[in-house]
Amino acid sequence: MVDLATQYKAIKTEVDTAINEVVSNTAFINGPAVKNFQKDLEEYLDVEHVIPCANGTDALQIAMMALGLQPGDEVITASFTYVATAEVIALLQLKPILVDVDPDTFMINIDQVKSAIGPRTKAIVPVHLFGQSAPMQELMEIAKEHNLFVIEDTAQAIGSDYTFSDGSKMKSGTIGHIGATSFFPSKNLGCFGDGGAIFTRDETLAKKIRMIANHGQSVQYYHDEIGVNSRLDSIQAAVLGVKLKKLDDYSNARQNAAQFYDDAFKDIPEIQIPSRVSNSTHVFHQYTLRLKGLNRDLLVSTMKAKGLPVMVYYPVPLHEQKAYQQEGYYPVTEMLCKEVFSLPMHTELDDEQLRFITKTVHETITELSK
Ligand SMILES: *Cc1c(COP(=O)(O)O)cnc(C)c1O
């Protein structure tokens, strides 16, 4: 699904130099590499405050801790997504309110968000799933009207641009009160281990976030808040510093691969190619198709048997997970969990690989259609 080895080969000298510098200056924790990466990312995202942390799940948790929510407060998020959002909400004794998504864009459904808002609702966590942005303009309007916080989960969409109706643009993750991202190796901006970051434009929130991520202290050994220990290692920051410079090129490479797939699949009636959100660029963390009228699991196992890596993101809706069971009506999420499959998507796909992948998909669909 990803090819990190080939990507590393192309940037080996730069990455090795950056890592060796950390090793020889031994500033493994909070060294200059972390500060430099933080500044570079602030500049790239055009956001006032980036607070690096240990992983994307921590980023979401710390973001939520910083908002001063009380046990039992409700947080609205999507039912069709990775578990991390619902997990941290529940972990903080808040109540995840799962809502259905749009069948074409896979993004949180605005009407469902509106009808889920109640007296205890305090926040909305949109997930920018697979590489493009949730409808942030509408969400920010709803949040303003109901006095809610918005925390963007941009673990899959770092680098994507969102355009507002007045033509102004912002990077995904910098629009809500807080943004959270992950630098897990397979993410669009990935390090060589775990990493994450939190973004905000609000100085007071930034201070609080920094403090919570550092054991609730802003002065060493004086703990004003209950915090956590969540740091980005200097070695990871050094790797990220190199890769951030290539992020736009990496996004382009993903977009080119997606275009190849689109062209190859657009005339197959059993397949729906990924819809583009009109006001967001798509950085294709995943290239996710919907299969119509055929057995998705059979398609996936047949393609795997032919040597083609295929994955299902995500096979089980959050509201059906044992830990997060929730009553409700989620027809779109349930349909998507049965129909979607994702093809290899990374920065190093060449034409030969793309031809093999698209040919295998064509052949398998023809076989299963007989
Ligand atoms: C990867 C991911 C996370 C969690 O990131 P980790 O660094 O693995 O903790 C959260 N949300 C989404 C949507 C993700 O894809």
Image (cartoon, rainbow, N blue to C red):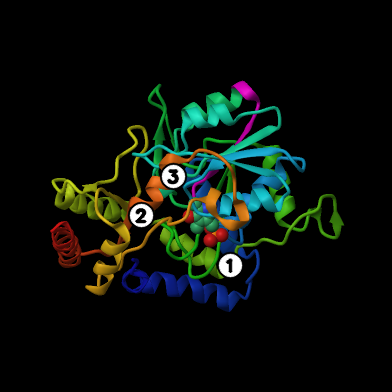
Q: Which residue is mark 3?
A: 333
Q: Position of residue 106 (x, y in %)?
A: 40, 42
Q: Is residue 151 magenta?
A: yes
The C terminus, quarter of image: bottom left
**Which of disc 1 and disc 3 is earlier in sequence?**
1
Is residue 173 rendered magenta in the image?
Answer: no
Q: Is mark 2 within 8 Å of ligand 1?
A: no
Q: Is residue 161 above or below residue 317?
A: above
Mark 1 CB lies closer than 8 A to ligand 1: no
The magenta span reads 145-154
Specify the label residue 286 is tagged with: 2
The x, y position of residue 28, in whole percent, is 63, 72
Q: Residue at 36% across / 32% down in the picture? A: 279
The residue type indicated by label 3 comes to Thr
Sequence order check, earlier mark of 2 and 1: 1
Q: CA distance from mark 3 to mark 1?
A: 39 Å
Residue under numbered circle 1: 234
